[in-house]
Image: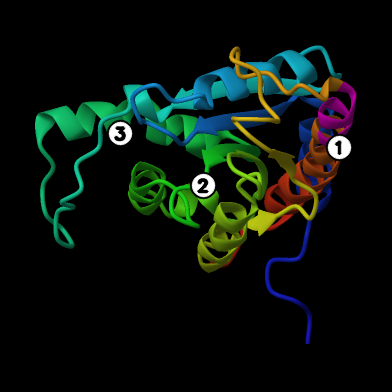
Amino acid sequence: MPADNPPTAETTVTAAVENDAPLRVAVVVGSVREGRQGRSVADWFLDTVTGLDGLDLDVIDLADTELPLVMPGWGGSQSPETAAVLADVSPRLAAADAFVVVTPEYNHSFPAALKNFIDWHHSQWQAKPVGFVSYGGLAGGIRAVEQLRLVFAELHAMTVRDAVSLHGPWSGLGEDGKPRDAAVCEGAAKGMIGQLTWWGQTLRSARAGRPYQG
């Protein structure tokens, strides 16, 4: 039997045109703690990858994105304040082809504000790749990343294999939030963004040819 909704000539052309367009990458800054280094780490990452061909970067800082912990029930209404926040960020996630999550590690896991932000959305993550920049402690935030991989798998997102792990803040990061071992960390960032770009273009083409059945 023929496959459902096989790609047509029109969808094939659309996919080719899409892959010539810049890859839209939403960079989510996951820490909201006072005195955080998350935004400094995110700025270092942006400085590192800005200028690479084919990227359109959009920063979503959760410190500026106030979503309540109490969610409405199915079919329930949202407060005007929550609706305004979602009207700003949800379309940006939907428009993104890929994501980079910048996260610290809190008690061997990731920040509650980041999980809350993820949970307020669903279809926006589907069939898109996610890369990670983590920081903190001797482990460099990798335990937070490993748990986030499980969360994004449930949301039908594809996490790229390589991640950026910044050890510190006491040794690996300077007071400005930039890595002390700049060459190694920049190499890791460019390696991760290379994988993210490949998956982002590939999955964008696939979604253009056939809508994802999540």
Residue that numbered label 2 is attached to = 105
- Dot 3, how many residues are within 10 Å of its Cα: few (below 14), some (14-19), or many (20+)? some
- Comparing 196 with 35, the one in front is 35
Residue under the image location 59 percent in, 43 percent down? 137
Secondary structure category for the residue under label 2: loop
Residue under the image location 75 percent in, 23 percent down? 55
Residue bounds of the magenta highlight: 183-188
Q: Nearer the viewer, mark 1 or mark 2?
A: 2
Residue that numbered label 1 is attached to = 194
Screen quadrant of the N terminus: bottom right
Upstream in sequence: badge 1 or badge 3: 3
Upstream in sequence: badge 3 or badge 2: 3
Secondary structure category for the residue under label 3: helix
Residue 78 on image: x %, y %: 13, 42
Residue that numbered label 3 is attached to = 86
- Dot 2, how many residues are within 10 Å of its Cα: few (below 14), some (14-19), or many (20+)? many
Q: Is residue 138 above or below residue 26?
A: below
Q: Going by the image, does 78 lie left or right of 13?
A: left
- Dot 1, how many residues are within 10 Å of its Cα: few (below 14), some (14-19), or many (20+)? some
Task: Report, in whole angstroms, how far the alpha carbon at label 1 lies from the one at label 3.
Answer: 30 Å
As shown in the figure, which amino acid type bears the numbered disc 1?
Gly
